C-alpha cells in the first residue's frame, strides 16, 4: 500500500490520533462523530481523486505510445494529474484543520501530555537497550 492509503485506513493525521486516544481525551460522542465524519469525507474524496489520477495516467500512457504523440495533450494530462495531487494534499490539510477545531484546549493540552509521556517511555526503552 502507498503511504497515503495507509494514512486513510487509520485516519488522517491528527484525526486518527484523536480517535485512537478517545478515552484518554474524554471525547464526547458528538466529538467522535464529527471526527469520524471528517475522516470519512476525506477518505471518499481521496478515493475519487486516486481513481481520477489512475485514469489520467492510463490516458497519458496511451498518448505517449502513439507513433506521433500530441505533446500539447501530454502536457495537459500531466498538468491535470498535478492539479489533482495538489487538490488532494490541500484537502488533507483542510481535514486536519477541521479535526483540530473539534477538540477543546484542555483536550489539546492532554494530547501533548500523552505524546510527551510516550516519547519519554520510548527514550527510556532505548537507553535500557543500550546497556
Image (spheres, rainbow, N blue to C red):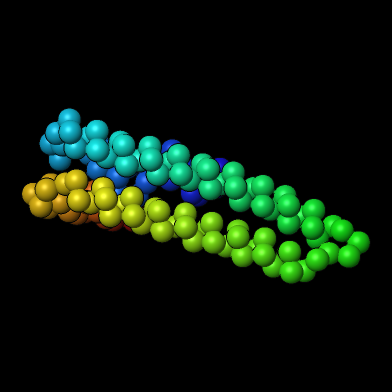
Q: Is residue 24 visible?
A: no
Where is residue 63 shown, x and y percent of the image? Answer: 79, 58
Where is residue 96 shown, x and y percent of the image? Answer: 31, 52
Q: Is residue 116 above or below residue 79?
A: above
What's the residue at 91%, 61% (across, down)? 67
Residue at the extreme right of the image, as rendered: 67
Where is residue 14 shown, x and y percent of the image? Answer: 30, 49
Q: Is residue 15 visible?
A: yes
> In this orientation, which residue lies closer to the viewer: 68 or 111?
68
- In the rendered structure, the answer to whether residue 61 lies left or right of residue 23 reads right
Where is residue 122 shown, x and y percent of the image? Answer: 28, 51
What's the residue at 24%, 33% (across, down)? 33
> In this orientation, which residue lies closer to the viewer: 127 or 7?
7
Q: Quadrant of the N terminus?
A: top right
Q: Quadrant of the C terminus?
A: bottom left
Q: Is residue 78 above or below residue 35?
A: below
What's the residue at 67%, 47% (across, down)? 55
What's the residue at 17%, 33% (across, down)? 30
> In this orientation, which residue lies closer to the viewer: 26 or 88?
88
Residue 84 found in image quarter = bottom right
Amino acid at each position: 500500500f502507498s503511504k497515503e492509503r495507509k494514512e486513510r485506513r487509520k485516519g488522517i493525521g491528527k484525526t486518527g490520533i484523536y480517535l485512537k486516544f478517545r478515552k484518554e481525551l474524554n471525547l464526547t460522542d458528538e466529538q467522535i462523530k464529527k471526527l469520524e465524519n471528517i475522516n470519512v469525507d476525506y477518505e471518499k474524496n481521496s478515493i475519487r481523486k486516486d481513481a481520477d489520477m489512475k485514469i489520467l495516467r492510463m490516458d497519458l500512457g496511451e498518448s505517449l505510445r502513439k507513433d506521433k504523440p500530441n505533446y500539447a495533450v501530454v502536457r495537459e494530462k500531466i498538468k491535470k494529474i498535478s492539479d489533482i495531487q495538489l487538490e488532494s494534499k490541500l484537502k488533507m490539510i483542510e481535514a486536519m484543520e477541521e479535526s483540530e477545531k473539534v477538540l477543546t484546549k484542555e483536550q489539546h493540552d492532554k494530547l501533548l501530555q500523552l505524546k510527551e509521556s510516550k516519547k519519554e517511555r520510548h527514550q527510556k526503552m532505548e537507553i535500557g537497550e543500550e546497556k
